[in-house]
Amino acid sequence: MKVEQISIFLENRAGRLEEVTRILAETGVSIRALSLADTSDFGILRLIVSDHEKAKKALKEHGFTVGRTSVVAVEVDDRPGGLNAILQVLSAGGVNVEYMYAFVQQSSKTAIIVFRFDKTDQAIELLGQKGIRVIPGDVLYNL
């Protein structure tokens, strides 16, 4: 139940993010979730998209450096303590969260958090044992 995420390395200058979104729009690829982290010289744009292969190909053709990473999307109750309940399960199982980003679903009582773990398969197993919903890629790509 892993989700494919693409990561794009961007020079930290005006117009680069717009270029990525334009290329994706022209290619017919929808962005489902994103995270942008930066330093003084470059940024890392992490995306969950409707078609990661198509996006990766189009961006590479335009000279972008693109990587692909497996992440896990987890449904979390949208309430105080919802995230903490998930993190307790992972912590107890010895799984480290390397990074994460989240979004709230429209007209829903849950949020979706995208995690990158140091032990992805173990994390999926631990979450499943506790009845925590891990969202398959084909569902997330089509939200």
Image (tube, rainbow, N blue to C red):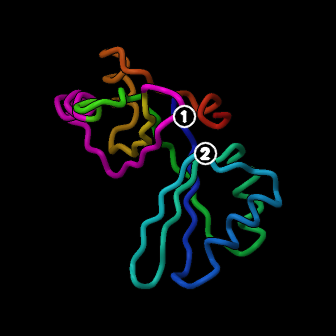
What is the three-letter code of the residue carrying label 1? Answer: Gln
- Residue 108 on the magenta segment: yes
**For the C terminus, which image quadrant?**
top right
Instruction: Report how many numbered discs are placed on residues in the image.
Output: 2
- Could you say which disc has been placed on residue 32 in the image? 2
What is the three-letter code of the residue carrying label 2? Answer: Arg
Residue at label 1? 106
Front-lying residue, 105 or 72: 105
Front-lying residue, 61 or 14: 14
- In percent of width and height, residue 52 lies at 68, 48
Q: What stretch of residues is rendered in magenta?
A: 84-109
- In percent of width and height, residue 97 lies at 29, 45
Q: In which quarter of the image is residue 137?
A: top right
Q: What element carries label 1?
A: loop
Front-lying residue, 24 or 105: 105
Q: Residues within 10 Å of mark 2 (few under 14, many from 20)?
A: some
Q: Residue at x 64, y 37 (%)?
A: 141
Asked whether the viewer can see residue 25, the reply is yes
Whichever of labels 2 and 1 marks the residue nearer the N terminus, that label is 2
